[in-house]
Amino acid sequence: MSSKYIKSIPVSVDAIPKSGAEMATYLNDVVMEAHTLINTLVSPPKDPWSFNFKKSNKYAEVEVTSRNNHLDEGREYWFARRSIHEVGGENLMWDDFLNLLFHGHSENEREYGPSVSRVDKLSLEWDLSAVSVPGWELVQVAAYAIHHHLPWPLNARVFPILLILAKAVDRKEFMVISLPIGISTETTGTNTETQQSVKIIGPKTTVGQYVAVERVIYEEPQTEAGKPNVVWSMATASDASGNLPMALQRRVIGSSIFADVEAFLDYVKKNKA
């Protein structure tokens, strides 16, 4: 997988175009790369993805795969998951994914992410008024910092990301793209829960890197008696940095992304109550 933008190496937030033709080119390339990547996730997995495990939570069966990727900067390790959800099953609807996983993505992540302790929106703006990507509606481009608490004695982690929300114009499909960004230690933002101004990187906070592409697509029934499905796919590469060896991180990422499916669907169920 050769990618210019979809990788776990952070890019300085100052180097990302904020408006105009350069921004349009940048976002077009990012969206196309993300869509190309997510389209490689099929079941059963095909090269270069390798099967890790498949098991069911209380809502659906989830297949987890992985792959190595060689970069000019070194090697990164990708993990992915794919699950299929019957529309109407467990009272689950397309709009649940659209309203809770797509819209307000980072803000909602604070509510269901098991280790997410705080979500900050950075004080940066991107002007989408003159930007278009063929076949896609760009709903949001914004910078966030996702804070995670880890068991003692590990320091808390913060993952600064550029969040891109893109929705297909001619079908029920959307992507959530998270790209790692580099920020200064003086960067400030707004705590999305309290609306207070905060410093993103605290004195005991370790900065990690995280890249992810999520795609949710609505599939029409394949037979007259069949029912529609929602297919939810996600691929990610990350480095929590600090004193956590990558070998140890790799052991838990697969189970973590598996658990995220149930955590989100529990959140959906809670919102319906």
Image (cartoon, rainbow, N blue to C red):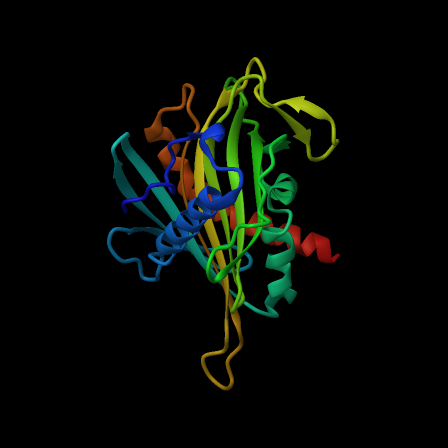
Q: Is residue 22 visible?
A: yes
Tell me where residue 58 sits by quadrant: bottom right
Name of the residue lying farthest toward the top = 203
Tell me where residue 254 sits by quadrant: top left
What residue appears at the point 60 percent right and 49 percent down from the top-left corner? 129
What residue appears at the point 52 percent right and 54 percent down from the top-left corner? 166
Tell me where residue 90 sits by quadrant: bottom right
The quadrant of the picture occupied by the C terminus is: bottom right
What residue appears at the point 42 percent right and 52 percent down from the top-left corner? 81
Q: Is residue 115 visible?
A: no
* Count of numbered marks: 0
Where is residue 170? Give x, y as percent. Answer: 52, 69
Where is residue 144? Give x, y as percent. Answer: 58, 34
Where is residue 179? Give x, y as percent. Answer: 46, 39
The foreground one among 152 and 168 is 168
What residue appears at the point 63 percent right and 30 percent down from the top-left corner? 123
Where is residue 89? Give x, y as percent. Answer: 59, 68
The foreground one among 226 and 13 is 13
Decide: is 153 above or below 166: above
The foreground one among 219 and 247 is 219
In this rendering, position of residue 156 left or right of residue 212: right
